[in-house]
Image (cartoon, grey):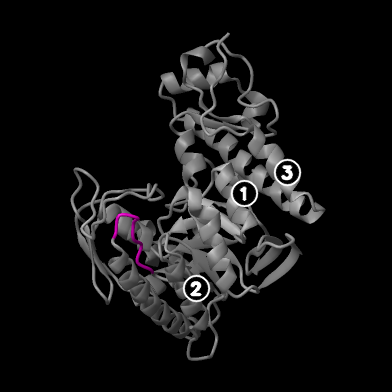
Amino acid sequence: MFTIGTRLPGRHGRTGIIRTPHGEIRTPAFVPVGTKATVKSVLPETVRELGAQAVLANAYHLYLQPGPDIVDAAGGLGAFMNWPGPTFTDSGGFQVMSLGVGFKKVLAMDAVDVRSDAVIAAGKERLATVDDDGVTFKSHLDGSRHRFTPEVSMRIQHQLGADIIFAFDELTTLLNTRGYQEKSVRRTHDWAQRCVDEHRRLTAERVGRPYQALFGVVQGAQYEDLRRAACRGLAAITGPDGRGFDGYGIGGALEKDNLGTIVGWCCDELPEERPRHMLGISEPEDIFAAVENGADTFDCVNPSRVARNAAVYTADGRYNVDRAEFRRDFTPIDDECDCYTCAHYTKAYLHHLFKAKEMLAGTLCTIHNERFTIRLVDAIRDSIAAGRFDEFKAETLGRWRPRRTVPQG
């Protein structure tokens, strides 16, 4: 399933190829997120033209709407959304927890002094409760009650039919106490074993379907001993056939400044011959840190999400195109970009679309941001193969500023 190519000397970073029933993924690779079987505001054909090798959809959201049975009847996720390439689905654990305590998509944070196991976002109602068997939660759509267990998550993901699926895990935040993080790692390990067992049972039952690779998910927050123990525990898990996980996901809330270090701890312990997926990153500095320390693939909603709020990426940083100074700016978002948007449209036009609240605004900026991210990761992969990763990293991050100040003129 996974072949290692060029390695970064003295580090875990490498190039490689993941082989799936629907094609190959050349790694490192960025995987755009199509939460509800669509990358918001753009056609699947456009996503392919942008250079994406795979897409990731969300088991929680597709379970609630339209239902995994409908996706199954359509022939699986790829057929349902008219995407011919490899697909991923996450387990639903992230959304059950994040929506359940009101944090939505924001879980990476700085460490804080406050610790509480009753953590909930300000002004939000708790929609999920966790026990050792699974999670009971209310739908964010209509308030109906549902229950996810490792077995339920596996059944949903088998119906969705993605090439790569993830074990059900309990996601914590940096606000949780050390004691709860320890308990959560043990719980996630127990759930991982149940996922492997159920995955093997369903694979044998669903005869004639392409094999779905199952990835275990590493938790442990910012604690080195918990991360390492979680990795060793997952690597030791096997099913009735003696086979373990096909790959691993590195998940959980973590300190942004410590991202590379945490990925490195995990890759010290995880089997080298298995691919490693980093859940939820897309900023250039995070991508370099993750790749250098051993992440092979990663996903994030950020390129499309910030695009819908007028934020666009360039080699020199991110800025908002709906700002007043762009009202008469008839140049593209980024002179160095090869995307459709930059070839055909100006900042002035995009500024107008946002002010007029036209849907096309989000489409054009999503095209640009997804292409920017995919092109960056492609260049990182090429730099590893060419033996010039460190030089490329220095050049790229030397220009990048997370919030770019555009000179007014």
Q: Of the residues shown, which amino acid type is indicated by label 1? A: Phe
Query: Could you tell me how far apart the alpha carbons at marks 3 and 2 are, in whole angstroms?
Result: 30 Å
Q: How many residues crowd mark 1 within 10 Å: few (<14), some (14–19), many (20+)? A: many
Give residue 392's mark: 3
Q: Nearer the viewer, residue 7 or 148?
A: 7
Q: Position of residue 381 (x, y in %)?
A: 71, 52
For this orientation, the residue located farthest to the right is 386
The residue under label 2 is 231
Q: Secondary structure at mark 2?
A: helix
**Nearest to N terminus: mark 3 or mark 1:** 1
Q: Who's the residue at 47% across and 48% down the image?
A: 256
Q: Secondary structure at mark 1?
A: helix
Q: Who's the residue at 62% across and 40% down the image?
A: 371
**Nearest to N terminus: mark 1 or mark 2:** 2
In the image, is residue 65 above or below residue 42? below
Q: Secondary structure at mark 3?
A: helix
Query: Could you tell me how far apart the alpha carbons at marks 3 and 1 are, in whole angstroms?
Result: 10 Å
Span colored in magenta = 169-176
The residue under label 1 is 288
